[in-house]
Amino acid sequence: MDIPDEELQIEEWQQTAAKQKAPQWTGDLSDDCTEEWAGLCLRAEWMNEIDWWWSVYDKRTQIEIDSSNRHEERYESGDAARVAADKAARVFLGVR
């Protein structure tokens, strides 16, 4: 993740919220789903009948934190895409 500190800073309430509640995905888990978690939006979507795209962005600023577009790895299932988005969000927030 390559985000300038002055553009996006983690707030204390985000880490607290992330520790209190695990992400819970909503929508069609076999096609297009979303999770709003600790001030972030995590998305996963089936793109071309093979690959899944995922993204994590800050809801306030709309700045993308990470996405499958930044990785060479292919995500061939919704589960894999959701796990990758969850991991990116957790790394960004500094929580397990």
Image: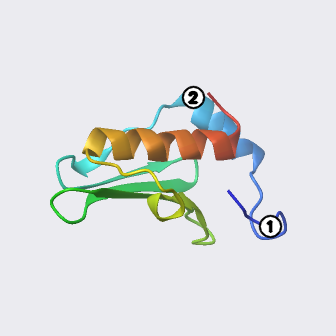
In-front residue for pair 49/17: 49
Residue 58 coordinates in the image, percent (x, y): 59, 62
- Judge depth for marks 1 and 2 and give the one in front: 1
Task: Reply above or below: 25 against 45.
Answer: above
Residue 5 coordinates in the image, percent (x, y): 83, 63
In-front residue for pair 39/47: 47
Residue 13 coordinates in the image, percent (x, y): 70, 44
Residue type, mark 2 in image: Gln
Residue 5 horizontal side relative to residue 91, left or right: right
Tell me if mark 1 has few (under 14), some (14-19) or many (20+) residues whose alpha carbon lies within 10 angstroms of its own: few
Task: Reply above or below: 59 against 73.
Answer: below
Q: Which mark is residue 4?
A: 1
Identify the image quadrant of the N terminus. bottom right
Mark 2 sits on what residue? 20
Identify the image quadrant of the C terminus. top right
Q: Which mark is residue 57?
A: none
Residue 77 horizontal side relative to residue 73, left or right: left
Residue type, mark 1 in image: Pro
Colour scheme in the image?
A: rainbow
Quarter of image, res 77: top left
Tell me if mark 2 has few (under 14), some (14-19) or many (20+) residues whose alpha carbon lies within 10 angstroms of its own: few
Residue at the far front: name it: 72
